[in-house]
Image: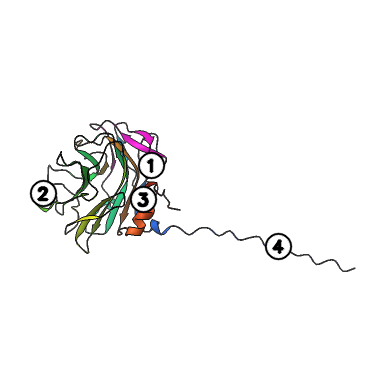
Amino acid sequence: MIPPLIQHRRRPRLISAAPSPLLTNLSSYWKLDEASGNAIDAHGVDDATITGTIGTTTGRINGARNFDNPSNQQFGVSNRASINFADIHWCAGGFFRLHSTSGQQTLWSRYRVSGNLRSMELFFNLDGTSGLLQFNMSSNGQSGTLSTRTAATFGTLSSDTTYWCYIEHDPTANLIGISINNGTLDTASHSSGAFQNNLPLTFGRRENATFGLNGWMDEWFFYRNRRLDSSERAEIYNSGAGLAYPFS
């Protein structure tokens, strides 16, 4: 008797999803979900060391780090090649919320007036009256080369409101730009890039303990040698809901 033909079924092949194109040239991504301690870089090597006690609160995606004592709180990434901005394409941004719109407050900074160590910073209410978010960059650390651009098209910020901000440097066109909630990119002329000082990259205040943030930050990203185009910014902003790392 001839045994029946046995048919062997092939196991289906598991096809893994391709990495998101948004990972290309991503240098650092801080989810800022930690309940306490340092801010961990989920993508690169730039963990940010905590100063003071920075708590957590509900952010746009999971948790956010809450700065509620502006005189004694910051995260800092020590000076290294991966946070040198130089005269290259780069961009950064993320979600934030202000608990109060009084006073001058720093979100992200590598900047000190004393010693002419200005590089770049993202600052709220810089002149104390405008209520606008402002991006500053200096090519040699001195005020004479400081270029500034406010997010004037978006306008005045409010307290207890969540925003997404985006800043960029374009060395080809010699421009810096800033946008809020994926709106118009307001630009200003700037040449020769950012001054390479030896200061840390700080979240929540300038490194010399001034102009502290009274609010929270969440899902902060930094790209080197790349800027995001309008469709990529729209993808990460995701109509205000955000797109969590690794963007899949």
Which amino acid lies under the numbered mark 4 shown in the image of this protein? Arg
Q: Of helix, strand and loop, which one carries label 2?
A: helix
Q: Of helix, strand and loop, which one carries label 1?
A: loop
State the mark number for residue 237: 3
Which of discs 3 and 4 lies nearer the camera? The answer is 3
Which residue position is annotated with label 1? 60
Q: Of helix, strand and loop, which one carries label 4?
A: loop
* CA gap, disc 3 and disc 2: 33 Å
Q: Within 10 Å of the Cα at label 4, are there few (<14), some (14-19), or many (20+) other Cα atoms?
A: few
* Residue 5 at x, y percent in the picture: 80, 67
Q: Are marks 3 and 4 in contact (CB under 8 Å)?
A: no
Which residue position is annotated with label 2? 143
Chain-order first, disc 1 or disc 2:
1
State the mark number for residue 9: 4
Q: Of helix, strand and loop, which one carries label 3?
A: helix
| Figure quadrant of the N terminus | bottom right
Structure colour scheme: rainbow
Assess whether residue 146 is covered by the magenta stretch: no
Chain-order first, disc 3 or disc 1:
1
Q: Nearer the viewer, residue 79 or 21?
A: 21
Name which residue lies at 38% across and 50% down.
239
Q: Which of 194 and 151 is in front in this view?
A: 151
* Residue 203 at x, y percent in the picture: 28, 41
Which amino acid lies under the numbered mark 2 shown in the image of this protein? Ser
From which residue to which does the magenta span run?
52-79
* Residue 162 at x, y percent in the picture: 32, 41
